[in-house]
Amino acid sequence: MKLTIVEYPDKRLKEKSKSVVKFDQELHRLLDAMYETMVGSNGIGLAAIQVGHAKRALILNIPDEDDEQSIDTLIEMINPVITQTSGVTTYQEGCLSVPSFYEDIDRYESITVNYQDRDGNTKRIEAYGLLSIAIQHEIDHLEGVLFIDKLSYSRRKKFEKEYKRVQKEKKLSKS
Ligand code: Y12
Ligand code: CO
């Protein structure tokens, strides 16, 4: 089932998500619906709060070397914790909750993450490149942080002005 994506400036995106304690059918249904929603919106990452569920769960589907995305490249992370970081990298990020906007954001170049899978099994991953950036972006969502929160004061002001303008245009084109 495709879910509705919560869009900025909805206050739910500021919420801190709660740890998952039950690895049951309800969680599996949510993860399945998140996958359908992400793929149906051309996304490569989605956190549960982006579909209105304040649970520490996220999914990622980074395209492979042939730029292909499939269920085989899907990663589901429950209760993720970054345990090691190194280096700095900059990438022009986008977010399904902030449609049509892309901004250069600094992140750690590589990270190690401990997490659980949908059945509660403990996992560890060492991530580099786009996967590392995407994990950090999605873990920020679990803390109620958006990539636009990392902009300088002047870039944020510019963004707010432009975002309001685009929202207004979208509203007008629908009416
Ligand atoms: C690097 C940086 C950030 C992430 C987080 C995951 N971000 C996304 O999945 C963003 C997807 C996105 C999709 C859009 O829609 C289309 O391209 C059709 C989009 O464009 C509009 O909203 C018009 C913007 C963002 C992962 C890795
Ligand atoms: Co996002």
Image: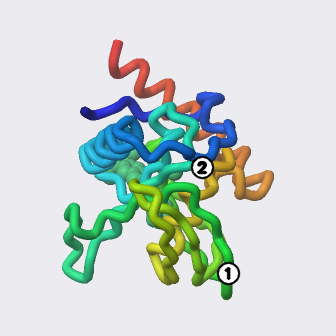
Task: Tell me which residue sits at (55%, 42%) in the image.
Answer: 55
Q: In the image, residue 53 lies at what x, y percent?
A: 51, 34
Q: In the image, residue 82 lies at what x, y percent?
A: 64, 71
Vertical placement of residue 84 versus 137, above or below? below
Q: Is mark 1 within 8 Å of ligand 1?
A: no
**Label 1 Cα crowd, 10 Å radius (few <14 / some 14-19 / many 20+):** few
Q: Nearer the viewer, residue 141 or 56?
A: 56
Q: For the residue marked with disc 2, what is the amino acid? A: His
Residue 25 falls in image quadrant: top left
Q: Please, which colouring scheme is shown?
A: rainbow
Vertical placement of residue 86 versus 9, above or below? below
Give SS at disc 2.
helix
Per the rendering, the mark at residue 84 is 1
Q: Is residue 98 left or right of residue 12?
A: left
Q: Is residue 41 visible?
A: no
Question: Which quarter shows the C terminus?
Answer: top left
Extreme residue in the right direction: 153
Q: Is mark 2 within 8 Å of ligand 2?
A: yes
Q: Which residue is mark 2?
A: 141
